[in-house]
Amino acid sequence: MSDYLSTGSVRTPEILVNTPKRRAEAPSSRDELFLEGYGRQFGEKMTYSIGMTYGAGLLSGGFYGALLGMKQGGATPKLFVNSLLNSCSRYGPALGNQSAIITMYYVCFNNLISWVRGADDIGNSAAAGALGGGLYKVASRSWQPVAKYSAASCCIFTGVDFAMRGGHI
């Protein structure tokens, strides 16, 4: 059986004639398959960081909600389980969303500060963390929540950046 393009009056299109015969080279080792190290591209860093902090916030908020649900209790086992699930579903997604949004701000500010300064050091993460936490609470009526979120985000993101650069995470 022959190729249907070579039969009759149909000719092979020029684009198919000029295609390269060589395929792309496969990675020579497993290490080349994955992007290693801290120098990820912006989109990869954004996706990875937001996913990780959303998951961590969801789990820790759900655990905190479970503790509060157990503390509240219920008259019957069904009411106890209902109280437990209601508390988990109240605190878990709230903390997950909050941490993911602050992380999105952090990654954007960190990339912007690195581009402006032309350097990628721990000072970028401290400034980006402070700006990210402050931007998250900028619409509050007082400066106190802005300062608290800014300081907490600065400490958390600087600590995580320090641990990643040192190879501890």
Image: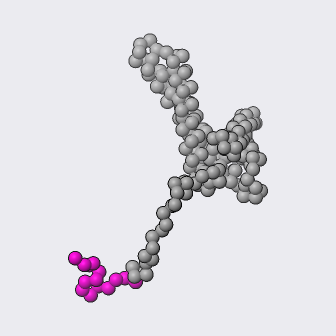
**Which residue appears farthest toward the bottom when viewing the image?**
9
Residue that appears at 26% across and 87% down: 9
- Furthest residue in direction top, as rendered: 75
Task: Evaluate whether residue 153 shows in this view.
Answer: no
Q: How many marks?
A: 0
Q: Position of residue 36 (x, y in %)?
A: 60, 52
Q: Quadrant where the C terminus lies?
A: top right
Residue 72: horizontal and vertical position, in percent? 52, 16
Task: Please tell me which residue is depicted at 53% across the width and 29% down the height of the picture.
Answer: 62
Tell whether position 26 is magenta: no
Residue farthest toward the front in the current orientation of the protein: 28
| Quarter holding residue 136 | top right
Q: Position of residue 128 (x, y in %)?
A: 72, 47
Q: Magenta residues, as a range?
A: 1-14
Nearest the eye: 53 or 142: 53
Query: 144 or 120: which is nearer to us?
Result: 120
Viewer-nearest residue: 141 or 150: 150
